Image (cartoon, rainbow, N blue to C red):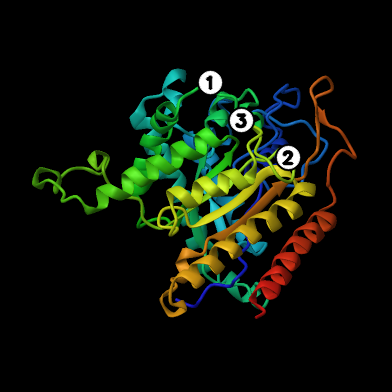
Amino acid sequence: MKKPSKILLLDGGISTELEKSLAARGSGTSNDDDDDDDDDSGACIHTSTAPVKFPDRNLWSSSLLLSHKGRLDIQSRHENFLAAGSNIITTVTYQLSHFATRFGYTEEQIDDLLLIAIHQAKAAAASFHDHDHDNAKPKGVDEKTFIVASIGCYGAVLADGSEYTGDYQLSVDDLMQFHQRRLEVLSRESNQIDGIAFETIPSLIEVRAILKLLKLKTKTKTKPRPKQDEGASSRSGCNRDVNGAVWLSLACQNGSTLNDGTSISEVLQVLDLEDPNSDIVHGIGVNCCKVGFVHELSLLLARHILDTRTSTIRDSDIKNLNPKAIRTIVLYPNSGEDWDAVNNCWEEGSGCTIAEDFANEMLRCIRSIHNLCREMDRP
């Protein structure tokens, strides 16, 4: 496989695109009083129109996976992002978890929907490449399509804005249990996906829960599989380790703190303590925050990663430095508009809604990180 570009483009706001598709067909309604404006990926430019209703609000855009037509809509939107130059597409599973058993679904139904979401992403990638669209991509854009399974935070399934506060009133064990089965299902499909993204994580306690769960599952890799499991169905592999890349994306209230008020510096210290060699978390970033915060956040992440790398080089032979031990930075903010719950619309002028301005802000982040790397590489 050709070496990937150093900068990869992630899809952004697929649920917003699905909303637009439904609205254009006249499906759904325009009087939804839902104030949950963010979806399974944050880099989206909202319009001032109110969102339409997906088939089941409890599953949000993932509820489109319940019907053949909805699955085709999802696949089409995936292909649109690839045509626009995206290297990475994320599955429509941000708000799809086994918490949905409280809404009448069975765990097996949720398992199946998770697998269907992966299938639709893979089908979109196959269809796109079969039509030789790679020749139309800008020069320098990698031809490989990476498929990443989206895992949303606990607050996402509550649909009450908790991802903006991180105030769950739950323990680490409670949050581990919430994420566990979904992670197990997706881990069993590690040969079908390139990675897993834990997205919009607003609190330190949820970061700790995810790290503890990933470490627990990584440890099972070294344990021999019981003979009776060898012929078991895919549903029974509950101790399968996590393969592929894993990134952790944080939800921030400003340029330096999580939504729960924890400093990003403290989060990074916990991450380094629990995973000093980047064995379980390979990327760290931010999403679901205002684009205006991202420049400061990106430099904070970059400085920490570079400082960690420098310490590693000082403490060991540079020849033995594993490049995989240096975490990737992942950035996908939203436009930062405010929702007017009274008039059911976005407040015009409250965010970065001009695509060119949004792109320029992201380019500023990339240039600043590049300049920082050059600075720190100087003797």
As helix, strand or loop, the secondary structure at mark 2 comes to helix
- How far apart marks 3 and 1 lie (CA) works out to 29 Å
Please name the residue shown 49% across and 67% down the image: 312
Image height of 238 relative to 52, above or below? below
The mark nearer the N terminus, 1 or 2, is: 2
**Would residue 235 be found to the left or right of residue 226 on screen?**
right
| Amino acid type at image mark 3 | Phe
- Mark 1 → mark 2, Cα distance in angstroms: 40 Å
Residue 10 in sight: no
Q: Could you tell me if the residues under marks 3 and 1 are in contact, i.e. CB atoms within 8 Å?
A: no
Looking at the image, is 376 positioned above or below residue 217?
below
Q: CA distance from mark 2 to mark 3?
A: 14 Å
Corner quadrant of residue 217: top left
- The residue located at (55%, 24%) in the rendering is 168
For the residues carrying marks 1 and 2, which lies nearer the camera in this image?
1
**Contact check, label 2 and label 3, Cβ < 8 Å:** no
Which residue matches tag 1? Answer: 169
Q: Position of residue 117 (x, y in %)?
A: 46, 44
- The residue carrying mark 2 is 24
- Looking at the rendered image, the quarter that the C terminus falls into is bottom right
